[in-house]
Image (cartoon, rainbow, N blue to C red):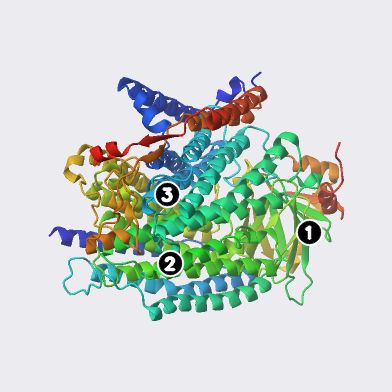
Amino acid sequence: MLGRLGLEALKHDWIEYMAGVSIVGGGLFILVIITYFKLWKVLWKDWITSVDHKKIGIMYIVVAFLMLIKGLIDAIMMRAQQAIAVGASHGYLGEDHYQQIFTAHGAAMIFFVAMGAIFGIINLILPLQIGARDVAFPFLNNLSFWLFASGGFMIIVSLVIGVFAGTGWTCYPPLALPKYNPGVGVDYWLWSVQISGIGSLLSGINFLVTILKMRCPGMRLMRMPVFVWSVLATVVLVFVAFPILTANLGLLFTDRLFSTRFFDAAYGGNPMIYVNLFWAWGHPEVYILILPTFGMFSEIVPVFSRKRLFGYASMVWAILAILVLSFIVWLHHFFTMGGGPKVNAFFGIMTMVIAIPTGVKIFNWLFTMFRGKVQFSSPMHWFLGFVILFTIGGVAGVMLALPGIDFQLHNSLFLVAHFHTVIIGGVLFGFFAGFTFWFPKFTGFTLDEKLGKRAFWCWLIGFLLAFMPLYLLGFMGATRRLNRYDVADWQPLFIIAFIGVWFVFAGVGLQFLQIFRSVLTRKERIDTTGDPWDARNLEWSTTSPPPVYNFATIPSVEGRDAFWESKKTGKPLSQGPLEDIVMPKNTACGFIIGFLSFVFSFAMVWYIFWLAIASLVGILAAVIYRVYGEEHEYVIPKEELEKRL
Amino acid sequence: MKKKYKIATLILSCLVSVVGSIFIILRSDIPVLDPKGWIAQQEKDLLITTSLLLLIVIIPVFVFTLGFAYHYRENNPDARHEPNWEHNSIAECLWWGVPVFIILILSILTWKTTHQLDPFRPLDSTKEPVEVQVVALQWKWLFIYPKEGIATVNFLQFPENTPVNFTLTGDAPMNSFWIPRLGGQIYAMSGMRSKLHLIANEIGDFRGRAAHINGKGFAGMVFTARASSEEDFYSWGESVRNEGSLLDFASYQELAKPSQYVPVQYYTVNEDLFEKIIDQYKTPKLK
């Protein structure tokens, strides 16, 4: 009846119990708060069922922040273990538990923090920047979010019921096959990533169509803000790369459940296929995360330098070059697998070539500051931190791109330091800059600058303390994923890294304090103009927060930086008369399908097949109801718009 | 006063971190930067060359970043402001061109060194190489010396200045074989046969370890690689042959069962053990 699920699934050690209790307790606490303040109706009507891209964007960001805390606690636990587990000491974590923690850390940070943050900002800003009222497929957007959230929830559930994978976030077979991992851990990982990956794919298609079809009159491709260009490249990558992941996970799933032996060398299969397919998705994924960050900085730097973006055309071509190149570098993740020297050299050189367009972008940003008037707002702090860290990380990346060097540093902590430098220094710093920059757009007030800058310094110092020692540890022969080691020389460096993690934790704490304080004292920093930074693009031409329809009349543009030009020349962006607006209607179907996907995944993890089939039938019913049984749109009449304006 | 205090703190913390880093680097033992074999030496030289070349990019980026941010700060009355200056062909050609040039040099270097340092390429030497077959198990390394007819667990010995030809396979999840002081990694995978050619130029004990997660006992998968004089190597081989019990396929399968923190063990073997281990993955045995 319950498949593999039994009371044993609840048996853990005391540290895991504490995690479980705090999660269940925290969840209950939130439910009580919602009930006490009678927020259920608001939550359901205005958020859960909403198809408004701005609300969905905020929900993505909330999930990303929650998962960031989870991932960060994982990081603290790992570094605490490594700070003490030298020589005869076993530390305080068992091997199994430690391995689950680093796997969950990687999966949570990549799939839910970085992806959530990026898709959150894209949702919030992209339709506004192209002068659209919503995305091309608003319901699909809501559904994408709920699939994403279900995937994240799977990781959380694995803390309480059963175990998570201990294979590292890449889950290579043969380690991920039942022979070595018969339990539910790998299945939790698999379904969590699969469900959220399908959500990302749908989201990618949605934004691809949105950018191509829904730009306002006059916004030709070469007039699009660079952020829109970067998102266009990102969603093309999503569209091409994510099906590879879905298919690869599908093969792994059938290998596990039906013994299809695609990856089992003992029966004619080949695990190297999995590794290739994983990185054929995995490397574009890195650019899926970093390109929108590049786009965000291309918006932020001109605004706070009071100057046009330097080298627009270069920027666009650099993005397109990265888009193409990102598909022909995946093999650099496994030079050590024994590819011939010609294959290795080709992929190494291609990897280094990517550094060229990336370097061009950095110089263009720097020359945007050149002859500008630089305001050291907190987004600019994040930008300057980003340039320094990303350059260090990028250079480490070019070094790893040489197979000769990679042979010595593959899977070492040097590698770990490299990708944390580019992902934290790049993706996260970019997200924080963008979040601060666009926060007034979706709330109507700015964030507290002082706390924002303090958070930045905590993050920067914490980052340097936590990851610079790791570069050195890599040279000292320390590999990743060690729960114990016997070289006493490594310990001081691990202790420094442990201290660094606490600085980062303090930074996140300050960011929460910053949001909390900004909400309390919002009257002091209220934004009535809709344009608190004296900015350049269309999203700032509407009110903050924008009405549900974004623009009362659709703007039309005649060049780049359209809003800036309109402010300077005094020519309004839109002269059209008010008309009735057709808007998409809220629907519960996205949430229901997302929830049933969670139930389905959970059932598949525990082999409760009747429940899996039932939830599939439920999903099908919800889709049919959505297509035939529901009204999709409503009209905001002209008269009401006049009243609102 | 407050600004002074901030600047003093900044300078002091920079100083502390620089001095601290130098102190840590000097008193630490850093195998990758202190190689004891030709391959690792080449790999280190490559690392240094590449780092120096990349400084051509890093230094301008850092100088421009801090310099521009400081000079063009909003309240600097001496800084020029040209809000519409957005294009300069020479400048843009420069930062497409210079990186292209650096990458071109690096590409040539990559092509050359990737061939030279290819793990599958036998090393040039007048001495006859030592053959070692490596099997990655859960969670220990089995080293088989087919010519000598011996096998060891988690311990490796070979003469100095003599090439060592490793042939690697696995009978466990995928793993990666690494002796930082001697050089590069290669994967050890079930049913496959990969190769690695190393040489030690000095006598000494070098740490080796598994570099790819392969389950619970991963952290304990360390071994010692000992480079000794030729006589010591042969007398060691002799003593192993006398001491060790026979590792036939049945006792191998017992050994291959998962175990952690396995102490050094000595065996004698028949020549075909390694092939038998690989062949397990070749026989069709679908039920």
Q: Chain of mark 1?
A: B
* Vertical comparison of A445 with B59: above or below: above
Which amino acid lies under the numbered mark 2 shown in the image of this protein?
A: Met
Q: Do circles 3 and 2 both sit on a common chain? A: yes
Measured Cα–Cα span from mark 3 to mark 2: 19 Å
Which amino acid lies under the numbered mark 1 shown in the image of this protein?
A: Gly
Query: What is the count of numbered marks?
Result: 3
Label 1 residue SS: helix
* Vertical comparison of A207 with B200: above or below: above
Measured Cα–Cα span from mark 1 to mark 2: 64 Å
Q: Residue furthest bottom?
A: B90
- The reply to whether the C-beta atoms of the residues labelled 1 and 2 are less than 8 Å apart is no
Q: Chain of mark 3?
A: A
**Residue A303, percent from left and from top:** 28, 60
- Mark 3, other Cα within 10 Å: few <14 / some 14–19 / many ≥20: many
- Residue position for label 1: B237
Quadrant (top left/top right/bottom left/bottom right) for the N terminus of chain A: top right
Quadrant (top left/top right/bottom left/bottom right) for the C terminus of chain A: top left
Q: Nearer the viewer, residue A79 or A238?
A: A238
**Residue B248, percent from left and from top:** 85, 46
Q: Chain of mark 2?
A: A
- With A21 as the anchor, is A637 left or right in this view? left
| Badge nearest the viewer, 3 or 1 | 3
- Residue position for label 2: A315
- Residue position for label 3: A122
**Residue A484, percent from left and from top:** 54, 45
Measured Cα–Cα span from mark 3 to mark 1: 65 Å
